[in-house]
Amino acid sequence: MDGPGRLAEYVWKRRTELGLSRPQVRDRGGPSIPTLKDIEEGTTRTVSATTLGKLDAALEWEPGSASDVLRGGTPKPRRANDGVASLGPDGVAVALRVVLDLLGISRELDTIAREMKDARLEDLARRLAVALRPMYGEYVTRLFEENKRENGSLSPVYAVFSELLDEPAGSDDDEDGKERLYRRWLAGREIDADQGLLAEFEARFSRRQQ
């Protein structure tokens, strides 16, 4: 197995062992969700030193472990007595019903803020919306992919998350912005994307069908 293939296997196994979702790996200081997907699927042939360092930190490996894996070695788990305090589980499972309730509250807050023309409330509503995205982003993307795969086009199930498709595609986070464009593309919406990005989306969706 070549370097990228070894890295894909070890990263996926370690993430599963720690019980982490891809958003949780990102929130621990790891790579972005799309980058992590490419690594785990073995579709990227080069991984930057910065990304390797992020994998070490998020997956609780000793520094240099991800790089060692690429060269044919094995990763070294970070020692328990390395001075890092244990703060309990990094994440917990959240029921879809709870996520939907939170999204409803977020939308209501945004509506009230706009009606009151209160800049502080508007900023709070924006921050809440951003904070909620890691909770549902990957799930919604997979939901859209599964429905497009099975039906040829999205079923009415995506209407529950229709506000995600109406969000501006622009974002301070390039990867987050790309993820929003991908969801809109899955839904059959028109998007402002060049041929290179459209080809990337086609390839990504094709990998999901395999």
Image (cartoon, rainbow, N blue to C red):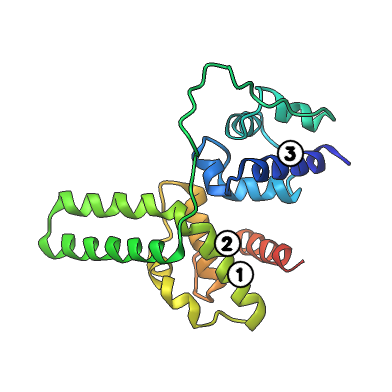
Q: Is residue 164 left or right of residue 72?
A: left
76 vs 122, nearest the viewer: 76
Q: To which residue does mark 3 refer?
A: 46
| Mark sitting on residue 194 | 2
Q: Residues within 10 Å of mark 1 (few under 14, many from 20)?
A: many
The one of 27 and 91 positioned closer to us in this rendering: 91
Relative to 70, residue 124 above or below: below
Q: Is residue 101 left or right of residue 41?
A: left
Q: Which residue is mark 1?
A: 145
Asked whether the residues under the numbered discs 3 and 1 touch, taking CB atoms below 8 Å apart as contact, a structural biologist would say no
Residue lying at 81% horizontally and 43% vertically, measured from the top left: 5
Q: Where's the N terminus, which quadrant?
A: top right
Q: Nearer the viewer, mark 3 or mark 1?
A: 1
Q: Residue at x 64, y 24 (%)?
A: 78
Quadrant of the image for the C terminus? bottom right
| CA–CA distance in space, label 2 to label 3 | 23 Å
Q: Classify 173 as above or below 117.
A: above
Numbered disc 1: secondary structure: helix
N-terminal label among 2 and 3 = 3
Q: CA distance from mark 2 to mark 1?
A: 21 Å
Query: What's the amino acid at mark 3?
Result: Thr
On the image, the x and y values in percent for residue 43 come to 75, 50
Mark on residue 137? none
Tag 2 near tag 1, CB within 8 Å: no
The residue lying at 49 percent from left, 39 percent from top is: 90
